[in-house]
């Protein structure tokens, strides 16, 4: 049941992304709508607002979790598409391991940055 | 007798896009795939901007942000938001249906045949209405 | 709608002869139209009266044998099961089914479909008791029968493979036909082979490559719903992986009838036998 577990994780990460990235998008894009509900979120992409966010543990936590889920979901999805195009088991193994390595590397880099900024 | 290998007639990637006059779900599948790949592309840019550029300090960040406020890129950003809404909502439907919900039970086929997806078309319509409303909300915020 | 009654129908048929080489091309034939004529009737007319080298496969002419699947006006149909009238057009384009290989003209090679069908063990698997010594039947209620009955009507025509976008590019993909049959046997209350069969579809080219495009169910000429079967199979796999759901015991063997009803007495002979 290995592929099934991987796929269940794909589905679960999809739901997690919908929630976490939903928060992220509402906070960064829907400033007018948020203002309507009385939340002040003007200029969410300005340096000040961003630094303010990145010094809060909760946002850093959201970002790192989101990154992990996103990388898994995206790379698993892309791998699925590539598998539909390669009829060779050996190539498939190479692709899978390549994706694992890329995913881990990006995750380390992507979580190192917010953590290092947390203290600055 | 001369033996000849059969001629391959696989449609390949073209067959993802069009293989005949099919109805709704086949194109929802295609759009799901396209939005997914599009967001992956966006993600690479987005991650570069928020890690590589951000770690270089305020000035680099502000020039990047100024670059990104170009109206064309804003429109692109809206497309990503709309893709996110679509991919998310359609994904939710797929998760439910892949677990056999919203599909009904197998019934003996009685003419005229109607398959589960078409019997439960209403759910797909509901999903698309929700997507449309959410996309409009995002559009509203991108233009004001 | 106006009565559809043209004098003639123009058939454009894709020809390909491996022995002459060359690419497949369309050839035009004009066929007189009669009411109630099927696409297969048109092809037979061409073969009998115009060009006897035209190859296609057909046998039962009643939608039962599954040999006449072809792409008519860009949609897969059983030629014998489809009236020309349905198209409301006097031009028909007939091509072989895609996502399979062409042997000649409209004849496609269904071997890949049959081999994946065979791969998923399409027969009842029983435990210890086995099927070796069949001396009684297995009990099954009508409700249990309905969970898989529609999937038992598959005629292996290959139309669902022609419709499937994953089959279009992925040659290792089992295809909707085989996976629907996998569900058909896994859902059968008389079967115990889930443990053997589920790992066969739990591969990189198994159920999880189905993305619910639903084209197979739309196109199936026998009203099967392979897409539904695959989703139910996914449900079984997920339940298995998460350890959810309860195992149903395989249906029992019907005990032999012990006491037989008293025989209806023979009526007396009305004619006396002569001694
Ligand atoms: S499932 Fe339907 S379309 Fe597919 S092979 Fe069987 S009868 Fe043909
Ligand atoms: S000839 Fe048998 S199904 Fe058409």
Image: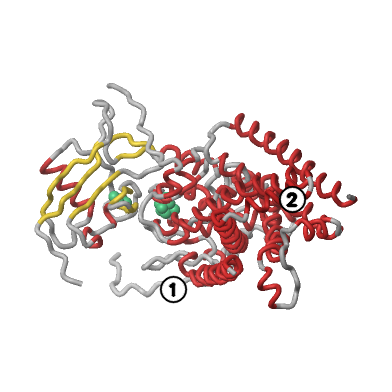
Instruction: Tell me which chain the residue with mark 2 is part of.
Output: A
Seen at 44% across and 55% down, the residue is C215
Locate residue C147, reporting x and y percent. Answer: 54, 63
Residue C155 shows in the view: no
Judging from the image, mark 1 belongs to the subunit labelled C
Task: Name the image quarter holding the C terminus of chain B.
Answer: bottom right
Which of C223 and A6 lies nearest the eye of the viewer? A6
Circle 1 crowding by C-alpha within 10 Å: few under 14, some 14–19, many from 20:
few
Q: Which residue reaches farthest bottom?
A: A37
Task: Judge whether residue C12 can be spotted in this image.
Answer: yes
* Residue at numbered disc 2: A67
Q: Nearer the viewer, residue C33 or C92?
A: C92
Which residue shows up at 86% across the image and 57% down it? A55
Picture coordinates of residue B84, whole percent (x, y): 61, 59
- Residue C196: image location, x then y, percent: 64, 45
Q: To which residue does mark 1 refer?
A: C265
Q: Are marks 2 and 1 on the same chain?
A: no
Give the CA separation, mark 2 to mark 1: 84 Å
């Amino acid at each position: 049941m290995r592929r099934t577990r991987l796929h269940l994780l794909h589905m679960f990460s999809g739901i997690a992304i919908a929630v976490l990235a939903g928060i992220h998008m509402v906070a960064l894009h829907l400033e007018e709508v948020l203002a309507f509900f009385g939340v002040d979120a003007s200029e969410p992409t300005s340096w000040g607002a961003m630094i303010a966010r990145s010094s809060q543990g909760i946002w850093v936590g959201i970002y790192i979790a989101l990154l992990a889920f996103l990388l898994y979901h995206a790379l698993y999805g892309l791998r699925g598409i590539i598998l539909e195009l390669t009829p060779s088991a050996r190539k498939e193994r190479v692709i899978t391991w390549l994706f694992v390595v890329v995913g881990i590397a990006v995750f380390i880099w992507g979580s190192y940055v917010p953590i290092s900024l947390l203290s600055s | 007798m001369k033996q000849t290998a059969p001629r391959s007639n696989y449609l390949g990637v073209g067959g993802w896009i069009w293989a005949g006059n099919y109805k709704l779900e086949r194109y929802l599948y295609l759009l799901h795939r396209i939005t997914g790949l599009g967001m992956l592309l966006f993600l690479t840019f987005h991650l570069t901007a928020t890690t590589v550029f951000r770690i270089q300090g305020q000035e680099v960040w502000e020039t990047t942000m100024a670059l990104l406020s170009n109206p064309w890129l804003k429109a692109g950003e809206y497309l990503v938001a709309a893709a996110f809404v679509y991919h998310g909502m359609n994904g939710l439907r797929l998760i439910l249906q892949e677990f056999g919900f919203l599909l009904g039970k197998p019934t003996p086929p009685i003419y005229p045949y109607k398959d589960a997806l078409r019997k439960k078309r209403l759910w797909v319509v509901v999903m698309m209405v929700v997507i449309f409303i959410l996309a409009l909300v995002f559009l509203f915020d991108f233009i004001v | 709608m106006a009565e559809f009654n043209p004098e003639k129908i123009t058939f454009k048929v894709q020809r390909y002869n491996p022995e002459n080489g060359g690419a497949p091309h369309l050839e035009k034939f004009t066929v007189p139209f009669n009411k109630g004529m099927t696409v297969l009737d048109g092809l037979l007319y061409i073969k009998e009266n115009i060009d006897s080298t035209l190859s296609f496969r057909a046998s039962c002419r009643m939608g039962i044998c599954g040999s006449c699947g072809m792409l008519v006006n860009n949609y897969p149909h059983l030629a014998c099961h489809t009236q020309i009238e349905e198209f409301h057009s006097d031009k028909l384009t007939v091509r072989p089914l895609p996502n399979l290989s062409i042997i000649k003209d409209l004849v496609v090679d269904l071997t890949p479909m049959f081999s994946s069908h065979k791969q998923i063990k399409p027969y009842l698997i029983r435990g210890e008791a086995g099927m070796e010594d069949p001396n009684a039947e297995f009990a099954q209620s009508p409700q249990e029968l309905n969970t898989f009955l529609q999937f038992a009507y598959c005629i292996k025509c290959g139309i669902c493979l022609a419709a499937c976008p994953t089959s279009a590019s992925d040659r290792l993909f089992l295809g909707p036909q085989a996976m629907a049959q996998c569900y058909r046997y896994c859902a059968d209350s008389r079967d115990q082979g889930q443990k053997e069969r589920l790992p066969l579809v739990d591969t990189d080219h198994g159920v999880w490559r189905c993305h619910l495009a639903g084209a197979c169910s739309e196109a199936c000429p026998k009203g099967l719903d392979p897409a539904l079967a695959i989703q139910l199979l996914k449900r079984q796999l997920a339940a298995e992986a998460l350890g959810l759901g309860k195992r149903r015991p395989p249906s029992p063997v019907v005990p032999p009838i012990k006491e037989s009803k008293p025989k209806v007495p023979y009526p007396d002979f009305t004619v006396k036998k002569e001694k």
